[in-house]
Image: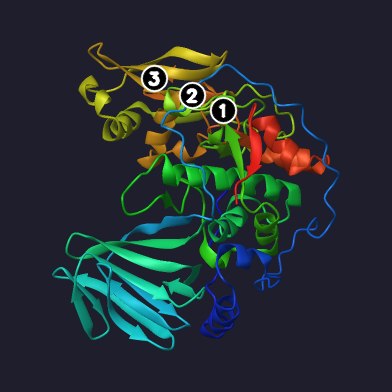
C-alpha cells in the first residue's frame, strides 16, 4: 500500500466554514449527497469524465464450499461506525473543534459549550485527565462535536469524534470514531496516486470498504478500536487527506461491498490488496497459513503492473544476527533456536515463491515460520536493509553472515487486488466492477445500504 505525507491541517477559519457546511448534513448518506467539495486542487485528469461502458462480467459460477474463518460478519443494513486508532501512544495532544461540543469522561458528560473549543492541551498525570485548568478522573475522555462538525488532533482535521483511552497513569491512545463512508474518503488518496484513474479509485473504494467492515466486525483487534491509520490496516489521513477524486469514488460506490462464500451464504470478506503483485497474485495462505475465503485463492495473472517501480527489484542482504533478533522478538516459537544459521524453504506457493520456511539454529534446532512473517518481523524491528525487501516473491540464498534475497518481484504481500495492475486496467477502459471481479475470484458486488 502506498503511504502519502500528511498535509498541513486546516486552519481555524477553514474549520469554521467546514463545521457550518457539515452541520447542515444529516449523517452518512446525506453527506454522500452533498455537492460541496473540500478546497483541494489536485484533481486527477480523469475526474469528471463519463465512465466507460460497463462490460458485464462472466456469470457467477458456484465454487466448492470453503468455510469462512473467522465466522462471516453480519450483513450491514446501514452505514456502520468505524473506530480508527490515530498514531502511537502519546502523553500530550492538542484538541479543538469549531462547533458546539461536549466532553465525556467514561461515558458521562462533564462539560458542554455552545461554541467552539480553541486548541487545548490534553494530558494525563496521576491517573487524571487534564485539559487547561480542568481535571477529571477516569479511563476515557471523548470530545463530541455537535452534528457533523470536525475535530482537530494535533493540527490534523478529522470528521466524527475523538476518543482518548488511558494507557497507564500518564499516557493514552487516540481513536477517531466516524462512519465508514467518511472514513473511506480519508483512505483512498493515501493509498493511490493523486492522478490515477477514477475507475481505480472506485475499485479500491469497494475493496477498502469491504476490508474495513470485515476487520471491524469479524476480526476485532482491540476492544477500543477496529483499525489502525497505517499499513497495519489501511492508510488513513482524516479530513486533511480527502480529495475530489476520493470523495467522488466513495459517493459513486456508496454501500457497495464485495461478497463471497458458499452459494446462498454470501458475506463480506477480508478484501486484501497490495501495491504491486509482481505478475501474479498470491493466495491468502501466504498471510494466514490458510485461506478464509474462496475469493482470495490467488493465481490471477496480472501483466498490467509492469510499470510499477518495484515490479522487479535488486538483491537485498539482511544480517543473520539482525534477522534472528527480529523474528525472536516477534514470534515466540523461534526463541529457542539460539541464533539463525540457515533457512530452508519448506514449501512454495509456486516455483520460486516461498510459503513456509524452516529456520535452523546453530545446534540444529528448527522452527517453522511463514515467509511473509519473516519480512514482517524484519520491518517491524527495523532490521537494516529490510525496507528494501519489498516482498517475499523472491529466492533466499545463504551468503555467509547474511541472507540474500534475489530475483525480487512486486511490492507487498500480493494478495487480492493489485493497485498498479488495477490502474493499468483502468487505463484500458476497464470499469471498477470488472477490475474487482478479475482479482477476487468468484466474488460478487452487492449494495447493502
Q: Secondary structure at mark 1?
A: helix
Dot label at residue 291 = 2
Residue drawn at point x = 54 percent, y = 84 percent: 16
The CA span between labels 1 and 3 is 37 Å
Q: Are marks 2 and 1 in contact (CB under 8 Å)?
A: yes
Residue drawn at point x = 54 percent, y = 35 percent: 267
Q: Position of residue 214 (x, y in %)?
A: 48, 42
Q: Which residue is mark 1?
A: 296
Locate the N terminus and report the quarter of the image it occupies: top right
Dot label at residue 400 = 3
Q: How is the image coloured?
A: rainbow
Q: Position of residue 444 (x, y in %)?
A: 65, 34
Q: Nearer the viewer, residue 232 or 321?
A: 232
Earlier sequence position, callout 2 versus callout 3: 2
Query: Which residue is situated farthest in the left direction here?
Result: 126
> Badge 2: few (under 14), some or many (20 or more) residues near its Cα, within 10 Å?
some
The CA span between labels 2 and 3 is 35 Å
Residue drawn at point x = 56 percent, y = 16 percent: 352
Earlier sequence position, callout 1 versus callout 3: 1
User: Within the image, what quadrant is residue 250 found in?
Assistant: bottom right
- Would residue 279 be found to the left or right of residue 355 on screen? right
Q: Nearer the viewer, residue 306 or 382?
A: 306
- Would residue 50 be found to the left or right of residue 101 on screen? right
Q: Secondary structure at mark 2?
A: loop
Q: Nearer the viewer, residue 260 or 355?
A: 260
Q: Secondary structure at mark 3?
A: loop
> Badge 3: few (under 14), some or many (20 or more) residues near its Cα, within 10 Å?
few
User: Within the image, what quadrant is residue 65 found in?
Assistant: top right
Amino acid at each position: 500500500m502506498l503511504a502519502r505525507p500528511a498535509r498541513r491541517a486546516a486552519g481555524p477559519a477553514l474549520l469554521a466554514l467546514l463545521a457550518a457546511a457539515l452541520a447542515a448534513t444529516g449523517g452518512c448518506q446525506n453527506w454522500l449527497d452533498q455537492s460541496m467539495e473540500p478546497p483541494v486542487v489536485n484533481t486527477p485528469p480523469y475526474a469528471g469524465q463519463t465512465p466507460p461502458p460497463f462490460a458485464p462480467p462472466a456469470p457467477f459460477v458456484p465454487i466448492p464450499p470453503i468455510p469462512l474463518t473467522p465466522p462471516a460478519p453480519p450483513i450491514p443494513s446501514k452505514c456502520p461506525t468505524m473506530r480508527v486508532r490515530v498514531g502511537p501512544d502519546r502523553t500530550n495532544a492538542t484538541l479543538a473543534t469549531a462547533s458546539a461540543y461536549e466532553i465525556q469522561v467514561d461515558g458521562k458528560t462533564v462539560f458542554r459549550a455552545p461554541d467552539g473549543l480553541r486548541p487545548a492541551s490534553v494530558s494525563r498525570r496521576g491517573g487524571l485527565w487534564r485539559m487547561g485548568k480542568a481535571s477529571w478522573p477516569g479511563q476515557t475522555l471523548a470530545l463530541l462535536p455537535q452534528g457533523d462538525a470536525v475535530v482537530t488532533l494535533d493540527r490534523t482535521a478529522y470528521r466524527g469524534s475523538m476518543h482518548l483511552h488511558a494507557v497507564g497513569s500518564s499516557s493514552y491512545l487516540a481513536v477517531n470514531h466516524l462512519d465508514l463512508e467518511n472514513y473511506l474518503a480519508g483512505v483512498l488518496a493515501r493509498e493511490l496516486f493523486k492522478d490515477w484513474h477514477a475507475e481505480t479509485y472506485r475499485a479500491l473504494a469497494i475493496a477498502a470498504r469491504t476490508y474495513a467492515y470485515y476487520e471491524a466486525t469479524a476480526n476485532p483487534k482491540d476492544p477500543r478500536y477496529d483499525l489502525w491509520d497505517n499499513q497495519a490496516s489501511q492508510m488513513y489521513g482524516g479530513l486533511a487527506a480527502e480529495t475530489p477524486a476520493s470523495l467522488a469514488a466513495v459517493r459513486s460506490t456508496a454501500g457497495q461491498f464485495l461478497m463471497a462464500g458458499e452459494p446462498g451464504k454470501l458475506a463480506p470478506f477480508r478484501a486484501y490488496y497490495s501495491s504491486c503483485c509482481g505478475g501474479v497474485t498470491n493466495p491468502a495462505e501466504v498471510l494466514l497459513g490458510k485461506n478464509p475465503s474462496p475469493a482470495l485463492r490467488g493465481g490471477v495473472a496480472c501483466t498490467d503492473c509492469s510499470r510499477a517501480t518495484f515490479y522487479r527489484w535488486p538483491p537485498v542482504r539482511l544480517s543473520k544476527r539482525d534477522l534472528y533478533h527480529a523474528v525472536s522478538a516477534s514470534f515466540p516459537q523461534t526463541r529457542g533456536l539460539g541464533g539463525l544459521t540457515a533457512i530452508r524453504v519448506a514449501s512454495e506457493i509456486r516455483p520460486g515463491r516461498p510459503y513456509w520456511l524452516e529456520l535452523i539454529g546453530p545446534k540444529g534446532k528448527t522452527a517453522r515460520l511463514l515467509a511473509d512473517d519473516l519480512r514482517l518481523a524484519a520491518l517491524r524491528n527495523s532490521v537494516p536493509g529490510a525496507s528494501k525487501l519489498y516482498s517475499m516473491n523472491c529466492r533466499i540464498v545463504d551468503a555467509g553472515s547474511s541472507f540474500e534475497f534475489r530475483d525480487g518481484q512486486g511490492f507487498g504481500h500480493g494478495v487480492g487486488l493489485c493497485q498498479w495492475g488495477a490502474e493499468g486496467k483502468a487505463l484500458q477502459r476497464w470499469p471498477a466492477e470488472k477490475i474487482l471481479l478479475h482479482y477476487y475470484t468468484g466474488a460478487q458486488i452487492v449494495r447493502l445500504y
